Image (cartoon, rainbow, N blue to C red):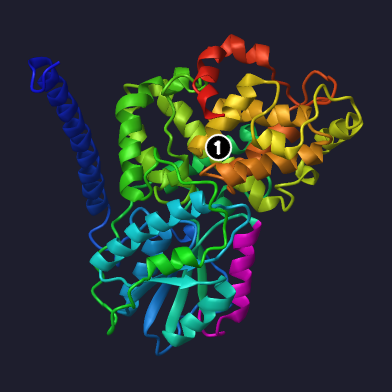
Amino acid sequence: MPRGSGKGRKERDAGREKEEAEAGAVGSLEAAVREARSRAAPSVRDFRYNKQRARLVSRGSELKEGAECILYWMCRDQRVQDNWAFLYAQRLALKQELPLRVCFCLVPTFLDATIRHYGFMLRGLREVAEECAELDIPFHLLLGCPKDVLPSFVVEHSVGGLVTDFCPLRVPRQWVEEVKERLPEDVPFAQVDAHNIVPCWVTSPKQEYSARTIRAKIHSKLPEFLTEFPPVIRHPHPPPNPPEPIAWDACYSSLQVDHTVTEVAWATPGTAAGLAMLQSFITKRLKSFGSQRNDPNKAALSNLSPWFHFGQVSTQRAILEVQKHRCAYKESVDAFVEEAVVRRELAENFCYYNENYDSVRGAYDWAQSTLKLHAKDKRPFLYELPQLEQATTHDPLWNAAQLQMVQEGKMHGFLRMYWAKKILEWTRSPEEALQFAIYLNDRYELDGMDPNGYVGCLWSICGIHDQGWKERDVFGKIRYMNYAGCKRKFDVDQFESRYTHCK
């Protein structure tokens, strides 16, 4: 067709109008969020902060005399706005009329993280640094383990009080303890759960058995905790000297991670992109979430897990915005709240109160017994880790799911269950199955190394938060899934065909 033909122009105009409409929708969400924050409280100094969100880590509670700043050690929640830890730190700084600083400790390696994870995180942190600069809040990127770089930074900048966010996992909790031991005794250290809507230690003082036992506890506290965020404001007490520019290229060079697992194109890092994905979910996919979220061929999921995992978007913000559409899509909104609040915070509870959250030893007694009883059962197939990683099993659906994860950094939620259960069926022992599943999940999933991931693997392989089912070989009483069951739920051939080209 000749260039400039009527049909070509119409197609281009339609595409341009669609892009402008989507950009306008995102802009309207951002404007609505800013307005809601501004209405929440006229001043960060004066708003009523729920004290249950924060707890003291150190013994002292009085701010250090002669202090020159307050420091927020950003770790898990990598955003400026909609961040209760950031707000708590700014409130302390405003009350003392002190500058506020923010730092992030970049460790050179972390569990099975690859450049896929680090790249997403660092690009998001660049956005954080730029936003902090606009608010006259210096952002510092410290290279090294927190215990080695943070205490000296506290002394060098005469920090009067330290605030950090919360993670229930083993390594971040160890970081907090190590920093606590090395801090000057006169510097109080507080921790704020900025990741969960209801703080983990408020929801329950113990490990909950299932969603059934935690659901009412969470919902009873939502009226108190599911509130609008006030804004982090331009800080009126800037430090005397600007921070040193961050050498981002040197930060990348300092990493000691695998670069063969490459970054993905579909997920743009940062809070702005995460809010755009939230808006896309609300306008395009929320209506289908309730009825079609378990069909891997349907575009019904929120796709927000990478931004939730890195704390670039607050789950609380997502719930606040999604709940505005309950009248139109009640089934979908209720299902989203169940998954993003109840199930996600149940995973946080499990990892916080069970030190064996990534081990068969963390399973319930009934599950450990049934898995042990069937540990010697003959497996229909046995695969080594490289065969699983390269998606060379006999099962085309499993291979397609594995390839989706490797290529896109995100496997469909329904298939994650099938994927992990087949690993139990095809490996030598439950221990090996869990080891392989966690390794593959953490290496390739953008939201790997997360309580949701550990609990998802343990639910599939060890029956966590589940019940005993009909006994069968290998699985014992662990819930079973098979290929035929998947074919009854969705068009398996259609999904498999999407990934045949990836091998």
Q: In this view, does 381 lie to the left or right of 67?
A: right
Give the tally of numbered discs.
1
Residue 327: name its quadrant: top left
In magenta segment, residue 173: yes
Q: Position of residue 144 (x, y in %)?
A: 54, 72
At horizontal 80% and vertical 45% (from top left) the residue drawn is: 361
Which amino acid is tagged 1? Answer: Val
* Image quarter of the N terminus: top left
User: Is 498 above or below relative to 337?
Assistant: above
Would you say residue 466 is visible in this rendering? no
Q: Mark 1 points at which residue?
A: 406
- Residue segment shown in magenta: 170-187
**Residue 46 image position (x, y, % from top left):** 29, 65
Residue 141 visible in the current orientation: yes
Crowding near pointer 1: few (<14 within 10 Å), some, many (20+)?
many
Q: Is residue 29 left or right of residue 180?
A: left
461 versus 146 height, above or below: above
Q: In this view, does 54 lie above or below 40?
A: below
